[in-house]
Amino acid sequence: MSADTLMREKPKAESLAATMAELGRKAREAAAELALASDDAKVTALLAAAKAVRSRENEILAANAEDVELAKADGIGAALLDRLSLDPKRLEGVAKGLEEIAAQPDPVGKVLAHWTRPNGLDISRVSVPLGVIGIIYESRPNVTADAGAIALKSGNAAILRGGSESFHSSRALVSALQDGLRAGGLPEAAIQLVPTRDRDAVGYMLGMSGVIDIIVPRGGASLIERVQRESRIPVIAHLEGLCHTYIDGAADPEKARAIVLNAKMRRVSICGATETLLVDRKAKAMLPPILADLRKAGCELRGDPEVVALDPAAHPASEQDWRTEYLDAILAVRMVDGVAGAIGHIERYGSHHTDAIVTEDQAVAEKFLREVDSAIVLVNASTQFADGGEFGMGAEIGISTQRLPPRGPVGAAELTTYKYLVRGNGQVRP
Amino acid sequence: MSADTLMREKPKAESLAATMAELGRKAREAAAELALASDDAKVTALLAAAKAVRSRENEILAANAEDVELAKADGIGAALLDRLSLDPKRLEGVAKGLEEIAAQPDPVGKVLAHWTRPNGLDISRVSVPLGVIGIIYESRPNVTADAGAIALKSGNAAILRGGSESFHSSRALVSALQDGLRAGGLPEAAIQLVPTRDRDAVGYMLGMSGVIDIIVPRGGASLIERVQRESRIPVIAHLEGLCHTYIDGAADPEKARAIVLNAKMRRVSICGATETLLVDRKAKAMLPPILADLRKAGCELRGDPEVVALDPAAHPASEQDWRTEYLDAILAVRMVDGVAGAIGHIERYGSHHTDAIVTEDQAVAEKFLREVDSAIVLVNASTQFADGGEFGMGAEIGISTQRLPPRGPVGAAELTTYKYLVRGNGQVRP
């Protein structure tokens, strides 16, 4: 009996509760099986899933067309509509992504540390899956495939709750992933989609303490706050990326120019895009060509009084600008006194995601690396490198901005934990 | 103006709020300074703190006598009174503990991983402190010294909230720790005790999201549940230790005998003490001398019907016995069918803390290590080895039973997180 049928036959709350409980029960069973699955089985499943995505292209695109139709009827904006839409090229990207995750090294069963005690006890710390991961995300259907595949590679069962706009697309994609799981001899409940668009389902997920081991909220700050407020389940939090690039007085002007343009404008909508440019008063002379590049590329500039004096076309920045993750072609620009001024601004306004310095002075670079307390700190490189793939860690489900590990890019290896194995020959504690 | 004075002058809630806010502000300032402190400064501070504990012995013991007096007046039990009481020998143990923590390697600034990307980006993952740690614990005053020192060694600022029974002892100990901090040129707010016995202070701590980075609740399950329910601050959870020892059919009978007696009776009140003994039906013949040893050592036995048939002096165990962490001289004993039966029982009733198998069969041992999903899994050794010191990890603030790291013993190294440092020479993302 499908969830849809259930919902027609029973009062809504009761049927949703039953649906979610059943989902949880199956996920726990699958997690126990997956934790012991060989990498071969996981690779077989992921490659078969890629094949199924390709062979079921028509079906998946038809489901996506249904989502797009409904979204248009709801008057959804053009940017969101673009994120929601699949086409043969994007779908091939999804299939390739699955193959890339398959090719990653198995993150489970790695000996992370190993030592022997004077009493002969042999101790090792070995990576193991987290268990059941609940992933709550927005409307991009490709996240369904990525998140499900990363969870599988790391031996975890996934309960996926995508944006309701992408429900039909996600359902078709999960169906293809489950084809893969069957081909690998793995339980198809290893990757489940919440089988309803009912928004109350999120509340049920947050209450599934003891069933879901970890919640990964991929959405705005309000979603993360809701999860932390409502749920007792531990979270891997992906907060906003209020990223800074700082041009030091000792910067190479050409590097600064290339890095700033890329950090802001390569893609303005990703969490690693620079939102605020900090400029050492000693680097003032480098600024005009940088601002000219940005404006030419279509970027709106908002500056402090010194910046506006230098570039009267810039809008005056307000206090709120230093706190804003634009995710758009807008840059806030502020003059500061050297690296200490930059660090002070970043600690006060930043989100501890990703921050960069441009300088040729090694000592200044090391001070910045040491004192900026962000998940990723770069020297002489674009903040847009804040990405698991660019780090060589493979596909990721986001950049964690929390303090407890995992921090930074969260790929398959970061969705594991560890346990201690102790081998003795009869030792007792004195 | 002291907190006590504040409390006499202002309405209680207002003064407590002000006290806690001031504590938090100082802790954040101290954390920023500590994160950049050298290991030399931390070592100097810890050694000076040990010296201060010794030189202020009379003062600390007088404060402890005050706590003991109040506790007696409150009719506290003998076991708790013993945990609360300090004497010159115990205080020397506290001082030695500080010296041992000083001697540990610096857990901060370690390069945990390092690689170079094809585009030349040099990436390293480096350990850094967590920030401000709030530690809520019960009445043993020595935890005040251990927890404060471990936090310091790992570069974190600590806000300590001990049991109100140990308030005067803890205050005197923190005063000695702060002598040490001053001697090391470190901010004395690096280690602060909540300066009031007011039980509402815990509620304030739980609400200090954005000020306290991590809460470590060391207490019963109800405290952990309260923290998870009331607080948005991430937790390092130390749940109960419902530990099992399983005697396999292929066990060495003498090893089994020594291990079980030690695992249960060495110290019955620690979280690594075995609470349930599982016995392979094939190992039945090994059981009588084991039970005789236990009874001789003063242990009450509660068995399933097969065990009671074998040993009529054993009490019948109820379903509740399999779920009980006695922390007392009581052992539940159950017959199972081989290692699969043992694993099934442990997964159903255990707390994922520490579990052990006794067997000479390598394949069975490896199955147990692989399939038992606990923080610590042992072969042919006592569960009482579940301890940071016994693992060679130095002093610990407990054994984490949560799934996300840190899992298992939590020492100074486990109170760190990491950040990524990326060194480039002008790279932009294609």
Image (tube, coloured by chain):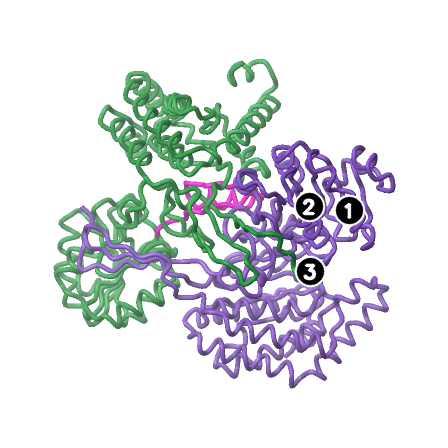
Chain colours: A purple, B green
Residue at which label 1 appears: A289
Q: Is residue A94 visible?
A: yes
Q: Residues at marks 3 and 1, common chain?
A: yes
Q: Is residue B316 visible?
A: no
Which of the two labelled residues, at mark 2 and mark 1, occupies the earlier sequence position?
Answer: 2
Chain that bears disc 1: A
Which of the two labelled residues, at mark 2 and mark 3, occupies the earlier sequence position?
Answer: 3
Q: Which residues are magenta?
A: B214-241
Q: Residues within 10 Å of mark 1 (few under 14, many from 20)?
A: few
Numbered mark located on residue A200 in the image: 3
The answer to which quarter of the image holds residue B290 is bottom left
Task: Tell me if residue B240 is in the magenta stretch.
Answer: yes
Which of these two is toward me, B276 or A400?
Answer: A400
User: Where is residue B178 shown, x and y percent of the image?
Assistant: 41, 23
Q: CA distance from mark 2 to mark 3?
A: 53 Å
Three-letter amino acid code of the residue under disc 1 = Pro
Chain that bears disc 2: A
Residue at which label 2 appears: A253
Three-letter amino acid code of the residue under disc 2 = Pro
Which of the two labelled residues, at mark 3 and mark 1, occupies the earlier sequence position?
Answer: 3
Q: Report the mark closest to the observer, 3 or 1.
A: 1
Q: Residues at marks 2 and 3, common chain?
A: yes
